[in-house]
Each structure stands twice: as C-alpha cells, then as structure tokens.
Image (cartoon, rainbow, N blue to C red):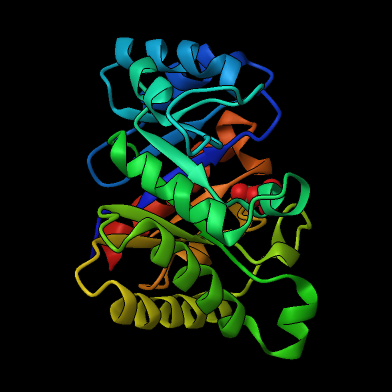
C-alpha cells in the first residue's frame, strides 16, 4: 500500500493558534508512516513554509488554488511558478467550492493540473458528486466525466498526483460517506484512471466531514489512502488525532 497522506485544507480560515504554531505542533508528531500536508490561504503560505522548514521539513505546504497561466493580466490570481518559488510543493485543484463558487470548469481544471505539473507541484485533484447526483445513483458517471475531461486537457502525464474523492453532500455537513461508499467510489476511480492514464502514479484519498470520531473506521479501508480535511483541520489536536488514526491503520494494513 502507498504511504497515506493527510492534508489540512484550511479554506479561508486560519486556526486560532496561527499558521506558525500549528505547523510547529504538527511537526512534533509527523513521522515516516504518514505524509502530512497543510494548505493555508495564500497570505499564510510563506509563514507556513518557513515554519515547516525550521521544524525539520517534514510537512509539505500546499496552496488551495492556482491559475493556469505563468503570468499576465489576471488580477487577483497566483501562478504555479510563483507558488513553487515560495517553497510550496503541492496545490489543491478542482475543489468543489472552486467549481461551485468560482467557475472552475473541468476544462480549466485540466489546464491548472498541467500548470502544476509544469512547475513541479504535486496536484491534489478533487472530484466528487453533488447530492442530487448521488441520490440518482449517477456518481460514477459524473466522476468519470471530471476525470476524463481533466486528463484529456492536462495530458495523462500528471504523476505523481493525489486524487481526492470529496462527495459534495459530505463537505462541511457532518455527514461523511461510509467507508463502503468511499471504497466503492475509490475503486471506480481506479478503474477509470487505469483506462485513461494507465501508467499514472497516484493515491486516492477521501474528504468530507472527516473527524477524529470517524477517521479510524474510514482509515481501516485499504482503498482510502489518506484524507483531505476541512473543518477538523482548524484545531491542531483534532487534526493530529486524525493523523494518528491514519498512522495506526497504516501499521495494521
Ligand atoms: P470538511 O471539508 O472536512 O469540512 O467537510 C473537506 C474539504 O472541503 O476539503
């Protein structure tokens, strides 16, 4: 099994203890068993990178978005090469909040994925269905479109990458997918990627209301190779409890 990865997606928030102290506390528990990534808002990236470096470089810092162009007249946007120069090593692309509120289309997401690759950033590519699609039983059709379109535009050479399955109905709702639902969808994602990018190296992680209370059960599924955590990543103790759950599961599997 691949090394599990745990990613804190702070969204437009900063934990009460601040980016620097969060990274310091988290660095105290990180070990080789599980990779840890923190994704702060843009203005806190530099502080997080510096803190991660000064505590042993064991935590990777990710941005939550990027633009696909290298530079130009794109007010308010940030390019992947700028992120790379800052010491950021990963970038979340295609989060459902970006798709829903900021007009990120499958096509644009594909271009962002290519830009991340070009700058040497590892993409955390998010896919997932909305509630109505889930209720209709059309989850895999929607995810297949998201995957195919993005890989078609980006080219299949995106390795290594992380694919995050985040059902929209589970994000910030307190209603997580069961391990069975997540595992079934992860298997579906693998069979699609096998067809469209047979040599891709990737991990499939789950996101959507992951908390210390459900992390152990979710982590016990072999199909779940890590978590993308929003709400529960804003408190370092909760985030580290989730880390411990992944770590224990990695040893057990
Ligand atoms: P949540 O968010 O953990 O608050 O549900 C997950 C995400 O959106 O990445």
Q: Residue furthest front?
A: 73
Is 188 situated above or below 114? below
* Residue at the (42%, 60%) spot, across then down: 153
- In the image, 20: left or right of 41? left
In-front residue for pair 217/61: 61
The answer to whether any part of residue 27 appears in the image is: yes
Residue 172 place in picture, x, y as percent: 75, 52
* Residue at the (53%, 38%) spot, across then down: 8
Q: On the image, which quarter does residue 60 sit in?
A: top left
Residue 141 place in picture, x, y as percent: 58, 84
Q: On the image, which quarter does residue 2 sit in?
A: bottom left
Is 253 situated above or below 98? below
* Residue at the (19%, 69%) spot, across then down: 199
In-front residue for pair 197/4: 197
- In the image, 155: left or right of 82? left
Residue 150 place in picture, x, y as percent: 47, 62
């Amino acid at each position: 099994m691949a090394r599990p990865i745990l990613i804190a997606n702070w969204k437009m928030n900063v934990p009460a203890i601040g980016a620097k102290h969060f990274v310091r506390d988290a660095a105290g528990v990180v070990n080789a068993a599980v990779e840890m990534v923190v994704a702060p808002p843009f203005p806190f990236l530099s502080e997080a990178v510096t803190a991660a470096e000064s505590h042993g470089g064991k935590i990777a810092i990710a941005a939550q978005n990027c633009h696909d162009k290298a530079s130009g007249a794109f007010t308010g946007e940030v390019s992947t090469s700028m992120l790379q120069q800052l010491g950021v090593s990963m970038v979340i692309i295609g989060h459902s909040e970006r798709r829903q509120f900021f007009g990120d289309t499958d096509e644009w997401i594909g271009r962002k994925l290519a830009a991340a690759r070009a700058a040497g950033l590892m993409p955390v590519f998010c896919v997932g269905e909305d509630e109505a699609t889930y209720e209709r039983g059309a989850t895999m059709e929607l995810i297949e479109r998201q995957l195919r379109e993005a890989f078609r535009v980006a080219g299949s050479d995106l390795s290594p990458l992380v694919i995050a399955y985040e059902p929209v109905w589970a994000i910030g709702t307190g209603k997580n997918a069961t391990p069975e639902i997540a595992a079934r969808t992860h298997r579906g994602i693998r069979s699609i990627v096998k067809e469209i990018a047979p040599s891709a190296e990737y991990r499939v992680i789950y996101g959507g209301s992951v908390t210390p209370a459900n992390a152990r059960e979710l982590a016990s599924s072999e199909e779940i190779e890590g978590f993308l955590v929003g709400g529960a990543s804003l408190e370092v103790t909760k985030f580290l409890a989730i880390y411990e759950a992944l770590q224990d599961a990695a040893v057990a599997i």
